[in-house]
Amino acid sequence: MSKNRVLSGVQPTGNLHLGNYLGAIRNFVKLQKDYECFYMLADLHSITVFQDPKILRENILETAAVFIACGLDPKKNIIFCQSSVSGHAELAWIFNCVSRMGWLNRMTQFKEKAGSNKEKASVGLFAYPNLMAADILLYKASHVPVGEDQKQHLELCRDIALKFNNDFNKKDFFALPEPIIIKEVARIMSLKDGTKKMSKSEESDSSRINLTDDENLIEQKIKKAKTDSGMLPDNLNDLEKRPEAKNLLSIYSIFKKISLQQSIQEFSGKNFSDLKDKLSDILIKEITPIGKKIKEIKKDRSKLKDILMDGKERANQVARQTIKEVHEIIGLTL
Ligand code: AQP
């Protein structure tokens, strides 16, 4: 097994935004220097809620284009579609039989995503963490970059690995993956409601900065971003009570590479419009070049498909070996 192997992914559910960039993709780019990285377009995860097939197909290519535009090198990294490597679904089924109902019942993300209508949620949405465990353990990844929301799922993945090893008396077959906690980036929140996360599937486009938004759109969205009536505060305690101000200042701090405390000092006692002007400028500078690259890369669909085909082959080589070993361990070979 290779040391320092990373597995992560993004669901191809369209509208990749600032949150996906700061919370995930920008870190993928940093990790490619020190780790052997497997980055998947998590299409099997995306269908846990209904996706229009035509749109899904487009979104898969779009997400691949985003990966490349943000700086992921398809030679250095293995970039592939989850569904193109059958081992994900095969191992997920085996883990459905290892994982316990009680464990999944404790997953808070299912409760949030299924909302009040649990009976109508797909079985896939409930079993999603087992598939995530399969994604990671299929490649025997040593590290997984996770945000706050995925920490519980990674714990479950470790529990599954441990139970598998114990059940079949194969100590250390699956090493327990370690999280890479992305500290500096808190959750990026909706521009319309500072208590909700910025999300691809949120209906209102003005709730997020998409990576393909042009200068005008970015400026308009920041101008219209929800604020409260006060001046910007001069301390962290007061900021904590003002989610919209905190969100805008946090985004500003990340791009300026300064602490939140320094941003508070810079804008203390000023109007939101001062912050918004500067934030627009910095977002335009950082995001529009990525958007232009995405549009350019998307023009060459066959090149994108070749990248995914190459990734599929390289991912499959590793995946097939794990599936073979797992089949032997659990008695599925004659
Ligand atoms: N608002 C966010 N702030 C910080 N990180 C975020 N991520 C998503 N939204 C934010 C991170 O992006 C990665 C990919 O996410 P995903 O597509 O696999 O699923 P998600 O978390 O459900 O993302 P969205 O944008 O909210 O998509 P939909 O609307 O389809 O559910 C993850 O690492 C995630 O933490």
Image (tube, rainbow, N blue to C red):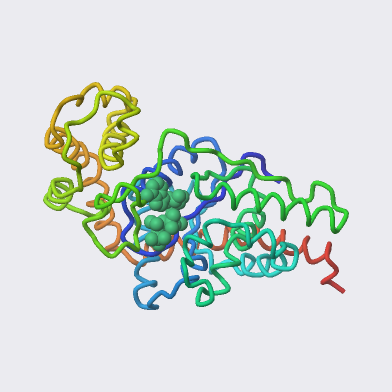
Asked if 179 appears above or below 303 in the picture, the reply is above
What residue appears at the point 62 percent right and 53 percent down from the top-left corner? 136
Indicate the position of residue 106 as horizontal and vertical percent values: 62, 57
Q: Quadrant of the C terminus?
A: bottom right
Asked if 45 appears above or below 235 in the picture, the reply is below
Residue 20 visible to an observer of this rendering: no
Q: Left or right of 328: which side holds 218?
A: left
Residue 230 visible to an observer of this rendering: yes
Asked if 19 appears above or below 55 in the picture, the reply is above
What residue appears at the point 16 percent right and 37 percent down from the top-left corner? 281
What residue appears at the point 54 percent right and 68 percent down from the top-left corner? 125
Q: Quadrant of ligand 1?
A: bottom left
For the residue pair 44 and 208, the one nearer the viewer reads as: 208
Q: Left or right of 114: which side holds 250?
A: left
For the residue pair 290 and 184, the one nearer the viewer reads as: 184
What residue appears at the point 43 percent right and 63 percent down from the top-left corner? 306
Indicate the position of residue 90 as horizontal and vertical percent values: 67, 69
Which of the 4 image quarters holds residue 241? top left
Indicate the position of residue 97 as horizontal and vertical percent values: 74, 68
